[in-house]
Image: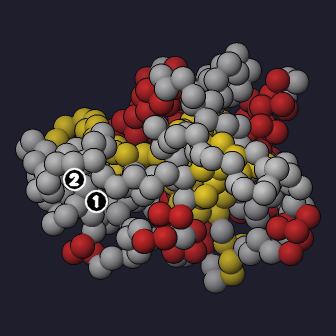
Amino acid sequence: MPDGRQLHLYGAYVGEPSFAVEAGHHEHAFSHRRWHPVRREWVVYSAHRQTRTYKPPTNDCPFCPMAEDGELPVKDFSIAVFDNKFSSLQKDAPRPSPIPGLDLPVESAAGNCEVIVYSSDHRATMGSLPQARRELLVRVWGDRIREAMNLASVQVVMPFENRGEEAGVTLHHPHGQIYAFSYMPPIIGAMAESFREGYDLAKLAALPPYVIADTASAAALVPPFARFPYETWIVPKAFHPNPGTLSATEVSDVASLLARVANTYDTFFGRVCPYVMVVYAAPRGMEKFFPFHIQFQPLLRAPNKLKFIAGVELGAGSFLVDILPETAAQNLRNVEVRP
Ligand SMILES: [Zn+2]
């Protein structure tokens, strides 16, 4: 892109990208991270992100093809990936200076943030995309993880999707994001420890009471220890460190389960279900034991009842759930998904 960011078009597209904006490096205000000595975790500060686009009207959607001042000046495209204009982590983030008077570890917020647009159709959703497009999406996740790992500082890459206003979405065009971290975020760190010690995720796919949809190579299931009322995971039956190593059949099974889960939520709750979907892949050096899988955390516990993350969850990190995972699995399994 003229401002120095990268754009990748996957699959078919129409027209050659022609950017109206002037060439020049886009404004760089670097983020940095500070160590939280009480919680023992990093906090990233990106003061420049406050001015980012907030819910523009549809005709101003920067992810629609040929939108004025948009990110994708092509006539049509399948899947587009580009560096986030308001990136929280930066490939070339410099080492920050220490904070005067404070003995606090401060590091660069090195890494990268990409936006991944699933379709040129503003109204598409994970569940409504054609199966071939969802298969391409799974492939693209694998390709972006592989490329991000080429950056020596990157430790782990996490594609994810926030869906719905309740999940903080400011642009409704179907898209997700891909964060490449130069440090280990605490949740992925805890997961890594568990998998290093031998926790077998694939065994969950063999527990019928928890499985809501099954295929030859992967299952969608409610984990027996779900933290959200209708949390669902997509777990491949064979071990893969990331989506890049899946066979064609496995890609197809994961893609069809993505639709199944997303559509099941909308049908079950009778409305567009806000969720956070996270694609977990092996951090650097953990490719032998950290399994690729996908987690959906829906933010509803009933059609018009949001699951709030409040006092006990935020204050103590202890989740309170008012439905048993067995019951949630049964409810979701019984949903007849609209074709
Ligand atoms: Zn759009």
Dot 2: few (<14), some (14–19), or many (≥20) neighbours within 10 Å? Answer: many
Picture residue at 54% right of the left edge, 70% below the top: 168
Tell me the kind of residue under disc 2: Leu
Picture residue at 80% right of the left edge, 28% below the top: 195
Tell me the kind of residue under disc 1: Phe
Residue in the foreground of this view, choosing between 32 and 308: 32
Q: Is residue 19 left or right of residue 302?
A: left
| Dot 1 and dot 2 residues touching (CB under 8 Å) | yes
First along the sequence among labels 1 and 2: 1
Q: Which circle marks residue 167 in the picture?
A: none
Residue in the foreground of this view, choosing between 30 and 164: 30
Q: Is residue 273 left or right of residue 28?
A: right
Q: Which circle marks residue 63 in the picture?
A: 1
Residue in the foreground of this view, choosing between 242 and 8: 8
- The answer to whether the beta carbon of the residue marked 1 is less than 8 Å from any atom of ligand 1 is yes
Q: How many marks?
A: 2
Quadrant where the C terminus is found in the figure: bottom left
Picture residue at 82% right of the left edge, 67% below the top: 314
Picture residue at 19% right of the left edge, 37% below the top: 12
Q: Which circle marks residue 72 in the picture?
A: 2
Dot 1: few (<14), some (14–19), or many (≥20) neighbours within 10 Å? Answer: many
| Percent x, y of residue 288 | 70, 16
| Percent x, y of residue 162 | 53, 60
